[in-house]
Image: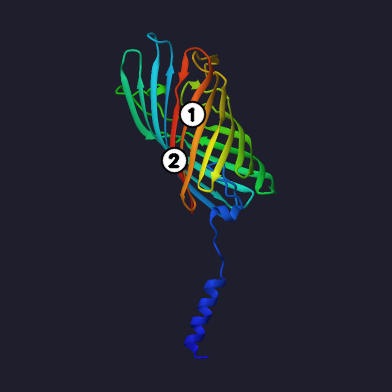
Amino acid sequence: MPPLRALILLALTWTFSGPTFACAVCACGDPTLTVMGAEQPFAGRLRVSGELQHRSDRIGQSGVDQVYLREQSLNLGFSWAPTDRWQLSLVLPLGHRFAEDVSLAETQIWSTGDLDTRARFVAWKQAKGQGSALLGLSTGLRWPTAPLNLGADGQALPMSAQLGTGSVTGALGLWGLRTWRPWSLFGSSTLYVAAPGVFPSLAGPSLRTSLLGQWQPETKLGFRFGEEIRVDAPAEENGRPEPDTGGWISFTTLDLLWSPAMDLVVRAGIAVPTLQALRGHHEEGLVLNLGVAVDL
């Protein structure tokens, strides 16, 4: 065989016998559409995401000391699974906050928020028929990377006009995923505890629990629904509970998941506060989400 033909044949043989890279669905062996943070890890899984979110709050007594907040943010996420047991992720928010106090004075802030770093561990997993079952642990730290916003007098604006907490916050939780086509169930419960920071006010421990079901009638289309519950201890300043902080709230959520192309998931969702038992004068509004996640 002439040397040139031998080299071409060798190159073609190496090319088509090399490692084959599959889509995320094939690599994890489960076609369930998942949002960022609920996916099944497999060695080398790399995912990026961007999510737009809108939310609002009213804190304080109307006509006395009420502050009305509106916030829009773009949350940029990145996750990487070095093995099929571990997944590392980070989320950086870019936000805009509008605050109006009882005097109708307005404050608008544009800045980055606090960087959230997280690690998830799969403690147990099993393939079950046409689906999967996973249980695991999660831990992480939220870092005070948001800039401190100052007023015209050079003093720090109140926390209602800040996009960060000014303190390091630790997180520890449990999570689980069960899929059986065309259904799936995802649950998680995470405790957040903040360390003292730059503000005199310190947020109390917060427990956040999610229980979400999903129906996926088509390979590229799914509907996710459920409850997200948050229980907060009151914030404290100088050892005393602050008014209008703490209590619990439950959101009913509905998401549409759509995969217009391989390894791309689009999410559009709404979370409506259906039960509110927040302390004092504190009322939260609905939350709107629109985002994409891409496996690379």
Q: What's the image's color scheme?
A: rainbow
Q: Which mark is residue 139?
A: none
> Residue 108, position in %: x, y?
33, 26
Q: Amino acid at mark 1?
A: Ala
Q: Secondary structure at mark 1?
A: strand
Q: Residue furthest front?
A: 217
Q: Quadrant of residue 227?
A: top right
Q: Secondary structure at mark 2?
A: strand
Left or right? Give the position of 58 relative to 174: left
The residue nearer to you, when weighing 55 against 244, is 55
Q: Quadrant of residue 113?
A: top left
The residue nearer to you, when weighing 240 against 73, is 73
User: Label 1 vs label 2: CA separation?
Assistant: 14 Å
Residue annotated with mark 1: 271
> Residue placed at 60% from the left, 52% from the top?
28
Picture mark count: 2
Could one spot residue 132 in this view of the protein? yes
Q: Amino acid at mark 2?
A: Gly
Residue annotated with mark 2: 291
Disc 2 crowd rating (10 Å Cα; few below 14, some 14-19, many 20+) is many
> Residue 212, position in %: x, y?
58, 34
Left or right? Give the position of 41 relative to 70: right
Could one spot residue 43 in this view of the protein? no
Labels 1 & 2 near each other (Cβ < 8 A): no
> Residue placed at 50% from the left, 15% from the top?
242
> Residue 95, position in %: x, y?
39, 34
Q: Is residue 127 above or below residue 20?
A: above
Q: Residue furthest top?
A: 64
> Residue placed at 64% from the left, 49% from the top?
85
Q: Is residue 293 above or below residue 57?
A: below
Disc 1 crowd rating (10 Å Cα; few below 14, some 14-19, many 20+) is many
